[in-house]
Amino acid sequence: MQILTVDIGTGTQDIYLYDSRLDIENGLKLVLPSPTMIIRRKLQTATRAGLPVLLTGFTMGGGPNQWAAEDHIRAGLSVFATPDAARSFNDDLQAVEQMGVQVIHQDEIPALPPGTLRLDLYDFDLSSIASAFSAFGVGLENLEAVAVAVFDHGNAPRDYSDRQYRFDYLDKRILSHNRLSAFAYLSEDIPPIMTRLEAVARSFQGQSHILTKETPLVVMDTAPAAVLGATFDPYVSSLARVLIANVGNFHTLAFRLGPSGIEGVFEHHTGLLDQKKLDGLLLALADGSLTHQDVFKDHGHGALVYGTEALPIPPREGREGIGPGLVVTGPRRNMMRGSRLKPYFAVPFGDMMLNGCFGLLAAAADLLPGLSGPIQQSLREAGRGIPPWEVG
């Protein structure tokens, strides 16, 4: 049984092919530039060549591609975009037009200037991934499932902060389903407000001819996927309570976890943090004093605290299973090197970059009961069980 998992971040897309016949450590893996970085580079090439650009396709992650589009416009060049592609920059198309992007419809494309460079936007490029594996003699035609993680703010109403809207969503989801895998959905169950997750599902449908049979798709938010994956580090899974910080390229998120589930969470922009500030946020989340406004007013996404019992995070003593502690992971985890909090650096199955993929795999086992047996067996054989806060 094979399951393709793809964790799509701002800097990289991390790809892991689970095969139930192999030890998890032997699964095939790729770490490649993220889709938004790929589009950014193509836009920069178009800017240097002085070409107008047309963006079509689906809503995808913004950030680097948006900044490149803004640079293109500042250079006096045109950026056209169909509505779905334009929503990669903002769900409010008026806001996109205020950037200088010209939002057009399909019937207007033939009238665009000659030489306009067309770029198709989508987060999940199954065709390219399949081609990459095929070059090494590995086929993806018979996948039992596909699981994809992207960051989705949610489609906030006009004049409503997307940061606040995201934390309203997180709060509701945690209160109704208090476990990390609650942020994963089968494609047919995606909430309508999660427009980026829906776009992944629609783009997958358009590429499903690559597969030889109807294949279920699981989609998940990147942050809970990464934290869930980190819990499969043997030291982390030995703890009854833990605070896990995922220091990503553009977002830093920390979950406080215990027997009752998620006890608290905060999310901030990595670029606005340094070690001292991150230490302070982690300590405040651990002792329960962190407030939503503490993070939101600093231009972060926010914070939620549910558990009343403080989580001590004393320095580790150099052995596993010593009790509550702080765990750090993520591609920018080196920010915490030398921290006075002396965190443990999680490396699940020997590869920190695949945290999100391992979290997706665990979530797929939760949402697809018919596949859960082999996945759970693989996890058990690797010496990791399901963490206590994920049971039930």
Image (cartoon, rainbow, N blue to C red):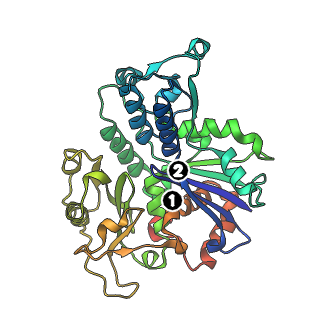
Residue at horizontal 48%, vertical 45%? Answer: 37
Q: Is residue 292 left or right of residue 22?
A: left
In the rendered image, residue 236, in percent from the top left (x then y), is placed at: 43, 75
Find numbered disc 1 in the image and state the secondary structure of the residue it sits on: helix
Against 340, is 208 above or below?
Answer: above
The single residue placed furthest to the front in the displayed view is: 49
* Picture disc at residue 149: 2
Instruction: Name the kind of residue labelled 1 in the image.
Output: Gly
In the rendered image, residue 305, in percent from the top left (x then y), is placed at: 27, 56
The single residue placed furthest to the right in the displayed view is: 212
For marks 2 and 1 on the same chain, the one whose residue lies earlier in the sequence: 2
Labels 2 & 1 near each other (Cβ < 8 A): yes
Q: Is residue 107 left or right of residue 140?
A: left
Name the residue beneath numbered marker 1.
356
Which quadrant of the rendered structure holds the N terminus?
Answer: bottom right
Against 291, is 26 above or below?
Answer: below
For mark 2, does the 10 Å Cα neighbourhood hold few (<14), some (14 to 19), or many (20 or more) residues? many
For mark 1, does the 10 Å Cα neighbourhood hold few (<14), some (14 to 19), or many (20 or more) residues? many
Q: Distance from label 2 to label 1 (Cα)?
A: 7 Å
